[in-house]
Image (cartoon, rainbow, N blue to C red):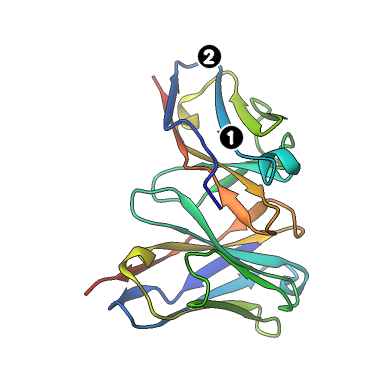
């Protein structure tokens, strides 16, 4: 079935790094742009970043620009989010989400992976 | 990019109708038809309910409908049911080629 599965979350100290992965199955991964969306505990959804279907285009929210890098390996059907210089305010559940076109809605979501940034 | 504005909470009795608004600017909601709505239950991932302002994905009941006027989009749920209770978020494509979410609305079915 069509699904996205995130992994790599955990507890990390401020200033350290973490890499999240998002594994896709059940569809032609290389045809789709993918976004990262996060949700801090008890808070709403926040858009984080997007990567185009071929990895040629990346865009980031101002809150993570210069610290987070999104990449993909279409041969492995996997997406990555490299998070550097982590801050306590980056604590959240991180979801990857597929879009059917660049302007399209998020039609498939992963289950999320929790990142906790704590001293 | 500022978050889209949604009411913090709405409520209704079973069988009633409710509407959730989502207000942005001409750089997001008002400028594009790429507005979508998501339902989220506690501890779960969001679920797409409406896309491109007023389209329902397969499997979403026709009790859910969307519309837009100017810089404000709306989600209407008619014939409220207990399982509709949860959090609802709107999102829009923006002129910066990014996305922006609303702050979320908690729907309570009385």
Q: Quadrant of the C terminus of chain B?
A: top left
Q: Quadrant of residue A108?
A: bottom right
From the viewer's perspective, is A104 left or right of A59?
right
Label 2, residues with CA under 10 Å away: few <14, some 14-19, many ≥20: few
Q: Which sits in the foreground, B84 or B27?
A: B27
* Residue A2 horizontal/vertical position (percent): 66, 62
Q: Tell me if residue B52 can be seen.
A: no
Label 1, residues with CA under 10 Å away: few <14, some 14-19, many ≥20: many
Q: Identify the residue at horizontal 39%, vertical 50% (top origin).
A: B43
Q: Which sits in the foreground, A32 or A27?
A: A32
| Contact flag, marks 2 and 1 (Cβ < 8 Å) | no
Q: Tell me if residue A101 can be seen.
A: yes
Inter-mark Cα distance, 2 to 1: 23 Å
Which label's residue is closer to the chain start, 2 or 1?
2
* Residue B91 horizontal/vertical position (percent): 60, 46
* Residue B62 horizontal/vertical position (percent): 68, 28
Residue located beneath label 1 in the image = B23
Identify the subunit bearing mark 1: B
Secondary structure at badge 1 equals: strand
Judged from this view, the residue extending furthest toward the left is: A119
Q: Quadrant of residue A39?
A: bottom left
Residue located beneath label 2 in the image = B16
Q: Identify the residue at horizontal 37%, vertical 75% (top origin).
A: A86
Same subunit, tags 2 and 1? yes
Relative to residue B9, is residue B43 depicted above or below?
A: below
Secondary structure at badge 2 equals: loop
* Residue A116 horizontal/vertical position (percent): 32, 68
Q: Identify the residue at horizontal 73%, vertical 67% (top origin).
A: A32
Identify the subunit bearing mark 2: B
Q: Which sits in the foreground, B85 or B18?
A: B18
């Amino acid at each position: 079935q069509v699904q996205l599965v995130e992994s790599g979350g955990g507890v990390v100290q401020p200033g350290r790094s973490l890499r999240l992965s998002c594994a896709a199955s059940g569809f032609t991964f290389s045809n789709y742009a993918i976004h990262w969306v996060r949700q801090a505990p008890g808070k709403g959804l926040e858009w984080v970043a997007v990567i185009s279907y071929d990895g040629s285009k990346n865009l980031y929210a101002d809150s993570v620009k210069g610290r987070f890098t999104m990449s993909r390996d279409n041969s492995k059907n996997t997406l990555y989010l490299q998070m550097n210089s982590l801050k306590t305010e980056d604590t959240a559940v991180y979801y990857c989400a597929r879009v059917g076109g660049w302007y399209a809605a998020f039609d498939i979501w992963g289950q999320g992976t929790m990142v906790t940034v704590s001293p | 990019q500022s978050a889209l504005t949604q009411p913090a909470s709405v409520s209704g009795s079973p069988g009633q109708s409710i509407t959730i608004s989502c207000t942005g600017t001409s750089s997001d909601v008002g400028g594009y038809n790429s507005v979508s709505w998501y339902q989220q239950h506690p501890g779960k991932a969001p679920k797409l309910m409406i896309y491109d302002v007023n389209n329902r994905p397969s499997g979403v009941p026709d009790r859910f409908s969307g519309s837009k006027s100017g810089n404000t989009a709306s989600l209407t749920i008619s014939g409220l049911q207990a399982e509709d209770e949860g959090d609802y978020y709107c999102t829009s494509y923006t002129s910066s080629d990014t996305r922006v979410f609303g702050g979320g609305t908690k729907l309570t079915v009385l």
